Image (cartoon, rainbow, N blue to C red):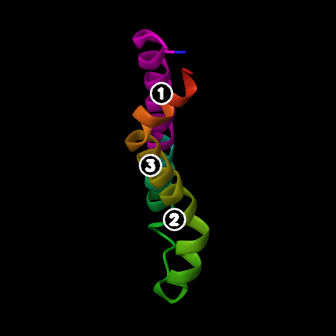
Amino acid sequence: MPTSDSAHQYSQMGVRLLSLYFITRGLWLLISNLLGSIPVFDPNYLGHYFYTQMLNPLVGIALGSLLYVLAPILGRRLSK
């Protein structure tokens, strides 16, 4: 059963909006973590700092980027 183009476009737009939310949230968390830790940054704990403060925002940015790239495929599957 073929789907209409408008349903596909709305589904694709929804996936892209979700991906932009993830990217924006990840950037916001990354910038706030970096700015909040400038006065107390200790290079001896760089690995611990990366895992606790930077990994979560970077995963969000990567997930949002992946969703943005896959939006046409996911939009087509969602509109079926």
Start-end of magenta stretch: 2-24
Measured as percent of width and height from the top left, residue 58 is found at 48, 59
Q: Label 2, label 1: how many angstroms apart (C-alpha)?
A: 33 Å
Secondary structure beneath label 3:
helix
Are there few (<14), some (14-19), or many (20+) residues within 10 Å of tag 1?
A: some
Q: Label 3, label 1: how many angstroms apart (C-alpha)?
A: 16 Å
Name which quarter of the figure residue 4 lies in. top left
Of callouts 3 and 1, the N-terminal one:
3
Of callouts 3 and 2, the N-terminal one:
2
Measured as percent of width and height from the top left, residue 61 is found at 46, 51
Measured as percent of width and height from the top left, residue 12 is found at 44, 25
Residue 54 is tagged as: 2
In this rendered view, identify the residue nearer to me: 55 or 5. 5
Reply yes or no: does residue 47 show up in magenta: no
Q: Amino acid at mark 2?
A: Met
Q: Is residue 13 above or below residue 26?
A: above
Name which quarter of the figure residue 16 lies in. top left
Q: Amino acid at mark 1?
A: Arg
Q: Which residue is mark 1?
A: 76
Q: Is residue 11 above or below residue 26?
A: above
In this rendered view, identify the residue nearer to me: 40 or 60. 60
Q: Which residue is mark 3?
A: 66
